[in-house]
Image (cartoon, rainbow, N blue to C red):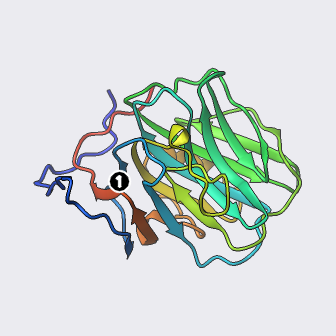
Amino acid sequence: MRLLFKAKFQTVNTIKYTSNTKYINISCFLDMTGKVFTFPRESNTDHVRLNTGYDKSLSVLTICHRSFTDLTRNHALFSLATPSRSNDIMIYYNSAPKLVEPHFCDAKAGYGGLDYAPNKWHSMCSTWDSNVGLIQLWFNGQPLTRKLGPGSTITGQPIIILGQDQDSYGGGFDPSQSFVGMMTDVHMWDHEISPCEIQKYMEELIFTPGNVLNWAALDFQTNGKSLYRKQCFYRQAAD
């Protein structure tokens, strides 16, 4: 076991759900360092919407995130839709062929042979450059094969969702594709960050945060039973 960091254990208030509990959307803008989003059940309602003030078109980008789940079925890890395309960006686990699939502009690349084991933290970074038409996935510190991607551009107001796959702009959620587990350290850049920067992210060293999404200055709304809380435990590095 490699200890990535040590967090002080402290009391965290728990939320008890009862038949009379009312769920409301909670909007926040804060530093999420040391915190996780928790998605506690399979549903077509629980999700987190990430807001960004970025209003330019995207033809090159990088997305990084860490996740923990016991799911072995299909599930979405990241979903960005625009009015013209519901899968402008999606990071998806396809359980039948056991592939992690980065989608860009409705085109996808499949990566198999990965140790995407349940009940472990996994770190992923996906890069896409439409100018050269290439997609690449980094998985738990390892760069994988560059694959053919679309030579297109993402335009229009984006809706970014964690916890669900958008089959329509801002909706169309299917519980069988929902994410159940924890997610943290979500960043997005409007360029392909260097392999050195990706490695720093993977090893939880100091790196340049995302300029489209920045986990340390995140604007978001929780919906349904999704919530965020302090990450008061040791995280084991994936092999």
Residue depicted at 87% across the width and 58% down the height: 152
Query: Callout 1 environment at 10 Å: few (<14), some (14 to 19), or many (20+)?
Result: many
The residue at the far left in this view is 11
Residue depicted at 52% across the width and 64% down the height: 209
- Quadrant position of the C terminus in the picture: top left
> What amino acid type should be assigned to the residue bearing mark 1?
Val
- Quadrant position of the N terminus in the picture: top left
Residue depicted at 55% across the width and 66% down the height: 213
SS under mark 1: strand
Q: Residue 237, percent across and down?
A: 39, 33
Q: Residue 184, percent across and down?
A: 41, 52
Q: Which residue is mark 1?
A: 36
Judged left or right of residue 29, residue 150 is right
Q: Quadrant of residue 236?
A: top left
Residue placed most toward the observer, 55 or 73: 73
Residue depicted at 14% across the width and 49% down the height: 9
Judged left or right of residue 51, residue 181 is left
Judged left or right of residue 12, residue 126 is right
Judged left or right of residue 12, residue 51 is right
Vertical position of residue 111 compared to residue 79: above or below:
above
Q: Residue 221, percent across and down?
A: 43, 69
Residue placed most toward the observer, 162 or 64: 162
Residue 12 appearing in the image: yes
Residue 34 appearing in the image: no
Q: Residue 169, percent across and down?
A: 66, 63
